[in-house]
Amino acid sequence: MRKTRFVVTLGLVMALGVAAIAYADGASDNEAGVVGKVKPTKLDKKKYKPVTLFTGVETSGTVTGAQQNPEQELISWGKNVKIDSKAAPTCSAPIEFLSTDAAKQACPKGSAVGKGKASIVLPGGLEYEGLTVTVFNGPAKNQVRLHTYDPRLAGATPTVFGKVVKSKDGSKYGQALTVPDAPDVAGDTGMITEFNASLDKKSGVATARCKSKKFLWKRTVTYDDGSKESVTLSQKCKRKGGKKK
């Protein structure tokens, strides 16, 4: 009798283990993060003023060469932040696979509106950190190109195409950056673990106010297998001329 119970229990444990393996997906195998910051933090309650807007994503997980990678990205900003692509010149030049300097030379002055960095990991743990990210306005209205370059990888670095759209994440959010086709690393065997950029205050593309006393970010990532994961972030702000409570 004891032996029978042991066999049944062992069978259930094995079945549950198989089920866990069968239903593992990108959202459960990876950990998604969103980072962000607005400078300055002391702003008018109603009037939007130029700011430096930092936004980025982080993804951690075991890179085996067959892992589920981020395929689509949607990053929403709270209504205290606005993006206006008309504030800067646009670049329509073919900048893919060029060096950072060559890409800037190919584009109109002022169309490079921000910069950041990226990191990738390849199977076996080989990591490349500090890839240069440059944000180019355009080529069309509300579009951006996130150009990456690193001399260690030469022409193997991608240019990420994004578009600023109306957010569908609820009444607290205004606009969002959508990346419908996130770039693959080494034929999708590697993974982008970090990707961020700051829109320069001098460009005038990013403006902000402090009506709700918080800046908000929400990232929704869709992995290769269709599974999704959402994470949020907030930062406090202060109103100019406001009374301290």
Image (cartoon, rainbow, N blue to C red):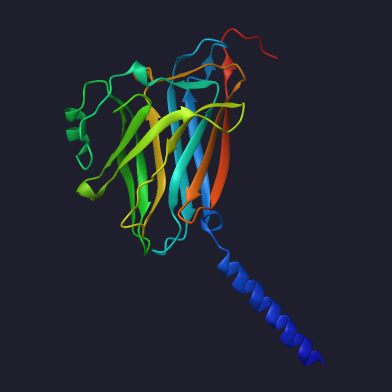
Q: Residue at x 20, y 39 (%)?
A: 99
Horizontal arrangement in the rendering, residue 171 relative to residue 75 (left or right):
right
Give whichever of 21, 56 is nearer the camera. Answer: 21
Horizontal arrangement in the rendering, residue 28 relative to residue 55 (left or right):
right
Q: Residue at x 62, y 9 (%)?
A: 242
- Residue 109 coordinates in the image, percent (x, y): 22, 21
Horizontal arrangement in the rendering, residue 63 relative to residue 16 (left or right):
left
- Residue 29 coordinates in the image, percent (x, y): 53, 58
Pick the quarter of the image with the C terminus: top right
User: Which quadrant of the figure has residue 188?
Assistant: bottom left
Horizontal arrangement in the rendering, residue 144 relative to residue 101 (left or right):
right
Give whichever of 181, 208 is nearer the camera. Answer: 181
Q: Residue at x 19, y 40 (%)?
A: 98
Give whichever of 242, 213 is nearer the camera. Answer: 213
Pick the quarter of the image with the N terminus: bottom right
Number of numbered discs visible in the structure rendering? 0
Asked if 57 appears above or below 203 in the picture, the reply is below
- Residue 145 coordinates in the image, percent (x, y): 32, 34
User: Which quadrant of the figure has residue 211?
Assistant: top right
Asked if 52 appears above or below 228 in the picture, the reply is above
Residue extending furthest toward the top? 241
Residue extending furthest toward the right? 1
